[in-house]
Image: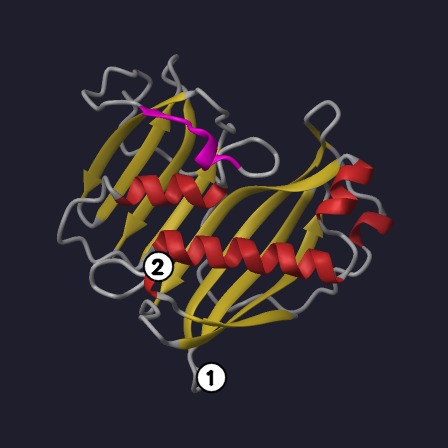
């Protein structure tokens, strides 16, 4: 298990002085990268081997959100590898050691030369010591769209144009950035406690992401579409 201790800063909270789902996703992404760095599987190794783990999906459940100045511990550990897929849990503990957030994530091992999934070798997995998975109700990797008529870019919404500031070191939109952009489309008054993210395609510099929003009961889905109406990512929140 890898852990990092942090204090929540003013720049990491919203107007209510609490983090949101985007902030949690950023914390978990950072924890993953630091874990990989400590076992020699960091960014330098990615460049050398031309292979990397790409995030396929999130499932995050927050009992409550960390607040401004709060001291927290973010933890992560892998619990399974199957074929080209890797499975990793996360949680956040408050200063008293109480679990306030828990999460699951699914990753795909990619050959960066041809951008195709590939099976990791024993050497690729060395150092990722597995531990028991969290007790939670695990959702499917794929998210089913509430409405089947989503394959159109005629949403009435102004497209989001991908800028340099959106990009990560792979020159794709940062995984957490999709979540941050989606938060602006969640209807006011929604008490978001759970989130799932289904990453379908990576958006790059200059791409236009057309948002579609679907609400049914306590579920809200934000889908970012390309110019052909095919999803880049599907983000689902619920109370």
| Residue at the (74%, 65%) spot, across then down | 129
Can you tell which mark lies on residue 116? Answer: none
Residue wearing tag 1: 97
* The one of 114 and 138 positioned closer to us in this rendering: 114
Residue wearing tag 2: 11
* Labels 2 and 1: the sequence-earlier one: 2
Toward which corner of the image does residue 119 lie, by quadrant? top right
Tell me the crowding category of disc 2: few under 14, some 14 to 19, or many 20 or more residues within 10 angstroms, Cα based.
Answer: few
| Residue at the (57%, 60%) spot, across then down | 31
Residue 227 to residue 64: above or below: above
Measured Cα–Cα span from mark 2 to mark 1: 24 Å
Q: Residue 238, position in %: x, y?
A: 27, 52
Q: Residue 1, position in %: x, y?
A: 66, 70
Toward which corner of the image does residue 83 lie, by quadrant? top right
* The one of 106 and 41 positioned closer to us in this rendering: 41
Q: Residue 21, position in %: x, y?
A: 36, 54
Tell me the crowding category of disc 1: few under 14, some 14 to 19, or many 20 or more residues within 10 angstroms, Cα based.
Answer: few
Give the magenta part as a residue range. Answer: 160-167
Mark 2 lies on a secondary structure that is helix
Toward the bottom, the furthest residue is 96
């Amino acid at each position: 298990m890898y852990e990092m201790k942090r204090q929540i800063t003013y720049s990491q909270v919203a107007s209510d002085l609490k983090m949101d789902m985007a902030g949690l996703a950023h914390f978990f992404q950072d924890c993953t990268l630091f874990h990989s760095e400590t076992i020699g599987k960091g960014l330098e190794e990615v460049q050398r081997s031309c292979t990397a783990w790409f995030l396929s999906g999130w499932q995050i459940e927050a009992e409550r959100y960390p607040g401004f100045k709060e001291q927290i511990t973010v933890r992560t550990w892998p619990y399974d590898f199957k074929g080209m897929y890797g499975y990793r849990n996360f949680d956040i503990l408050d200063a008293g050691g109480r679990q306030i957030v828990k999460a699951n994530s699914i990753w795909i091992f990619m050959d960066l030369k041809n951008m195709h999934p590939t099976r990791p070798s024993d050497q690729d997995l060395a150092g990722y010591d597995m531990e028991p998975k969290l007790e939670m109700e695990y959702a499917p990797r794929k998210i089913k769209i509430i409405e089947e008529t989503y394959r159109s870019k005629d949403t009435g919404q102004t497209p989001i144009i991908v800028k340099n500031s959106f990009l990560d070191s792979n020159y794709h939109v940062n995984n957490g950035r999709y979540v941050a952009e989606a938060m602006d489309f969640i209807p006011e008054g929604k008490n978001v406690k759970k989130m799932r993210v289904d990453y379908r395609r990576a958006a790059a510099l200059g791409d236009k992401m057309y948002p579609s929003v679907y609400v049914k009961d306590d579920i809200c889905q934000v889908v970012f579409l390309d110019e052909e109406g095919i999803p880049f990512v599907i983000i689902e929140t619920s109370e």
